[in-house]
Image (tube, grey):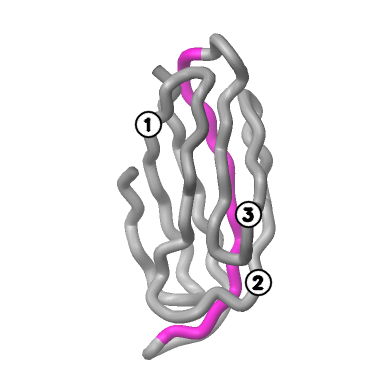
Amino acid sequence: MSVTLANWGENSNGDIDVTSGESCLFPIQIRGTVTESAISQKPAHGKLKKLDASTFQYTPKGKYKGSDTFAVKATGQGPTASGTSVITVRATIK
Protein backbone atom coordinates (compact mmCIF):
# COMPACT_ATOMS: atom_id res chain seq x y z
CA MET A 1 0.00 0.00 0.00
CA SER A 2 1.25 3.45 -0.88
CA VAL A 3 -0.53 6.53 0.46
CA THR A 4 0.41 10.18 0.23
CA LEU A 5 -0.06 11.51 3.76
CA ALA A 6 -1.66 14.90 4.22
CA ASN A 7 -2.60 17.08 7.16
CA TRP A 8 -6.21 17.11 8.28
CA GLY A 9 -8.25 19.27 5.93
CA GLU A 10 -6.12 18.29 2.90
CA ASN A 11 -7.04 15.57 0.41
CA SER A 12 -4.69 12.71 -0.43
CA ASN A 13 -4.32 9.74 -2.78
CA GLY A 14 -3.24 6.15 -2.29
CA ASP A 15 -2.52 3.00 -4.26
CA ILE A 16 -3.08 -0.59 -3.16
CA ASP A 17 -2.48 -3.99 -4.76
CA VAL A 18 -4.95 -6.76 -4.01
CA THR A 19 -5.09 -10.37 -5.16
CA SER A 20 -8.41 -11.25 -6.79
CA GLY A 21 -10.73 -12.89 -4.27
CA GLU A 22 -8.79 -11.67 -1.22
CA SER A 23 -9.28 -8.67 1.08
CA CYS A 24 -7.05 -5.73 1.95
CA LEU A 25 -7.19 -3.58 5.08
CA PHE A 26 -6.98 0.14 4.45
CA PRO A 27 -6.12 2.16 7.56
CA ILE A 28 -6.43 5.96 7.53
CA GLN A 29 -2.88 7.13 8.16
CA ILE A 30 -3.04 10.85 8.83
CA ARG A 31 -1.21 11.95 11.99
CA GLY A 32 -3.52 12.52 14.91
CA THR A 33 -6.94 11.16 15.83
CA VAL A 34 -9.77 10.16 13.51
CA THR A 35 -13.05 11.36 15.03
CA GLU A 36 -15.36 10.11 12.28
CA SER A 37 -15.21 8.59 8.81
CA ALA A 38 -17.44 7.33 6.01
CA ILE A 39 -17.29 5.94 2.49
CA SER A 40 -17.62 8.86 0.07
CA GLN A 41 -17.25 6.87 -3.18
CA LYS A 42 -18.07 3.16 -3.38
CA PRO A 43 -15.85 0.89 -5.48
CA ALA A 44 -17.31 -0.27 -8.81
CA HIS A 45 -15.71 -3.73 -8.76
CA GLY A 46 -15.81 -4.77 -5.11
CA LYS A 47 -17.02 -4.01 -1.62
CA LEU A 48 -15.69 -1.53 0.92
CA LYS A 49 -16.57 -2.10 4.57
CA LYS A 50 -15.94 0.26 7.48
CA LEU A 51 -14.42 -1.73 10.37
CA ASP A 52 -13.94 1.21 12.77
CA ALA A 53 -13.38 4.97 12.55
CA SER A 54 -9.90 4.58 11.09
CA THR A 55 -9.91 1.23 9.23
CA PHE A 56 -11.71 -0.01 6.11
CA GLN A 57 -11.62 -3.39 4.34
CA TYR A 58 -11.69 -3.63 0.54
CA THR A 59 -12.63 -6.90 -1.19
CA PRO A 60 -12.69 -7.06 -5.01
CA LYS A 61 -15.32 -9.17 -6.78
CA GLY A 62 -14.26 -12.78 -7.21
CA LYS A 63 -12.24 -13.47 -10.38
CA TYR A 64 -12.12 -9.73 -11.26
CA LYS A 65 -8.75 -8.45 -12.41
CA GLY A 66 -8.07 -4.84 -13.30
CA SER A 67 -8.44 -1.55 -11.46
CA ASP A 68 -10.94 0.00 -9.10
CA THR A 69 -11.27 3.30 -7.27
CA PHE A 70 -12.93 4.28 -4.02
CA ALA A 71 -12.80 7.21 -1.60
CA VAL A 72 -13.05 7.63 2.16
CA LYS A 73 -13.93 10.88 3.94
CA ALA A 74 -12.43 11.32 7.41
CA THR A 75 -12.54 14.05 10.03
CA GLY A 76 -9.88 14.37 12.67
CA GLN A 77 -7.48 16.37 14.80
CA GLY A 78 -3.73 16.36 14.30
CA PRO A 79 -0.76 18.08 15.93
CA THR A 80 -0.89 21.07 13.54
CA ALA A 81 -4.33 21.00 11.88
CA SER A 82 -7.87 19.68 12.11
CA GLY A 83 -10.57 19.22 9.50
CA THR A 84 -12.02 16.80 6.97
CA SER A 85 -9.97 15.01 4.33
CA VAL A 86 -10.94 12.83 1.37
CA ILE A 87 -8.59 9.93 0.61
CA THR A 88 -8.98 8.53 -2.91
CA VAL A 89 -7.59 5.02 -3.36
CA ARG A 90 -6.70 3.35 -6.67
CA ALA A 91 -6.74 -0.44 -6.33
CA THR A 92 -4.96 -2.81 -8.71
CA ILE A 93 -6.49 -6.28 -8.59
CA LYS A 94 -4.18 -9.06 -9.77
The image shows residue 86 at horizontal and vertical percentages of 55, 60
Q: Which residue is drawn at 54% across and 67% down?
A: 85
Q: Mark 2, residues whose alpha carbon is within 10 Å: few (<14), some, or many (≥20)? A: few
Q: What residue type is labelled 1?
A: Asp
Q: Distance between the residues labelled 3 and 1?
A: 19 Å
The image shows residue 70 at horizontal and vertical percentages of 58, 41
24 with respect to 58 (left or right) = left
Secondary structure that dominates the magenta span = strand
Q: Give the range drawn in magenta.
A: 65-78
The image shows residue 3 at horizontal and vertical percentages of 35, 52
Q: Mark 1 points at which residue?
A: 17
The image shows residue 47 at horizontal and vertical percentages of 66, 33
> Element type at marker 3?
strand
Question: Which is more foreground, mark 3 or mark 1?
Answer: 3
Residue 93: give its label.
none
Q: Name the residue under label 3.
A: 51
Name the residue at the bottom extreme. Answer: 80
> Element type at marker 1?
strand
Q: Name the residue under label 2.
A: 36
Image quadrant in which the C terminus is located: top left
Q: Mark 1, residues whose alpha carbon is within 10 Å: few (<14), some, or many (≥20)? A: some
Question: Which is more foreground, mark 2 or mark 3?
Answer: 3
